[in-house]
């Protein structure tokens, strides 16, 4: 999947999280940091890919990307598995606990969940592609959906664009059908500052 589709899938997953998360006290600062963490989570598994967009944005990014990719076992390996989610989730938790004193008013539990749902959305989306995802590493089997490989998506091709539009449509439909509630929630979040 392309980074653009992963970004949209991650934000969709964050929207779903906010439906179930008791967010009565979410401040604007927490919401902004949660969106940032969610978008990082949404592309984090692809640090194993030297051609990933965020490596391009770093000086000598391609070189470091190759180095990190090799260290992580190549593309779609450990970072694309349940173990990878647990390890990166732990690292994210430690990082958040470390920086929490600098921003004590942020709800780091929500920020952490935003990161995790972003990461899981990445793995779910990659599962829909031809390559599949080794969810159960160290068991070296790549899982895909649908099980028939030829029915899955090729990255960047028209099926992925269709999926992108479907996801976009889902978001627009949800926001439109919950318009009043959404406006109230946004007003409340902004008012809390
Ligand atoms: Zn990926």
Image (cartoon, helix red, strand yellow):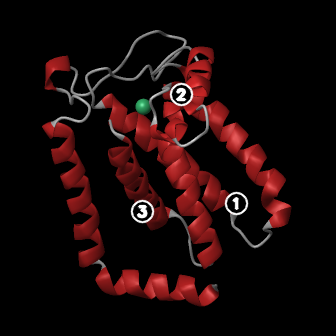
| Residue 145, percent from left and from top | 26, 28
Res 28 seen here: yes
Q: Would you place residue 66 above or below residue 111 in this image?
A: above
Q: Earlier in the sequence, mark 2 or mark 1?
A: 2
Left or right of 67 in this view: 128: left
Q: Position of residue 33 (x, y in %)?
A: 61, 64
- What is the C-alpha distance between the residues marked 2 and 1? 32 Å
C-beta proximity under 8 Å, tags 3 and 2: no
Whether 67 is drawn above or below 129: the answer is above
Which residue in the protein does label 2 denote?
A: 62
**How far is the residue under mark 1 from the one under mark 3?**
17 Å
Q: Of the two numbered discs 3 and 2 on the same chain, state the one appearing first in sequence.
A: 3
Relative vertical location of residue 40 with respect to residue 185 in this rendering, above or below: above
Q: Which mark is residue 108?
A: 1
User: Residue at 69% across / 44% down in the picture?
Assistant: 92
Which type of secondary structure does the marked residue at label 2 adopt? helix
Q: Is residue 154 left or right of residue 113?
A: left
């Amino acid at each position: 999947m392309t980074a653009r589709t992963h970004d949209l899938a991650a934000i969709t997953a964050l929207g779903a999280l906010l439906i179930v998360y008791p967010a009565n006290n979410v401040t604007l600062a927490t919401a902004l940091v949660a969106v940032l963490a969610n978008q990082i989570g949404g592309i984090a598994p692809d640090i194993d890919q030297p051609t990933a967009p965020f490596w391009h944005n770093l000086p000598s990014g391609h070189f470091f990307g190759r180095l990190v990719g090799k260290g992580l076992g190549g593309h779609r390996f450990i970072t694309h598995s349940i173990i990878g989610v647990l390890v990166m989730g732990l690292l994210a938790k430690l990082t958040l606990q470390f920086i929490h004193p600098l921003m004590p008013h942020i709800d780091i539990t929500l920020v952490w969940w935003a990161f995790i749902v972003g990461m899981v959305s990445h793995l779910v989306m990659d599962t829909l592609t031809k390559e599949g995802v080794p969810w159960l590493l160290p068991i070296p089997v790549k899982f895909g959906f649908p099980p028939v490989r030829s029915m899955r998506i090729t990255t960047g091709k028209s099926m992925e664009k269709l999926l992108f539009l479907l996801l976009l449509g889902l978001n627009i439909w949800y926001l439109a059908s919950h318009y009043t509630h959404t406006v109230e929630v946004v007003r409340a979040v902004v008012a809390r500052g």
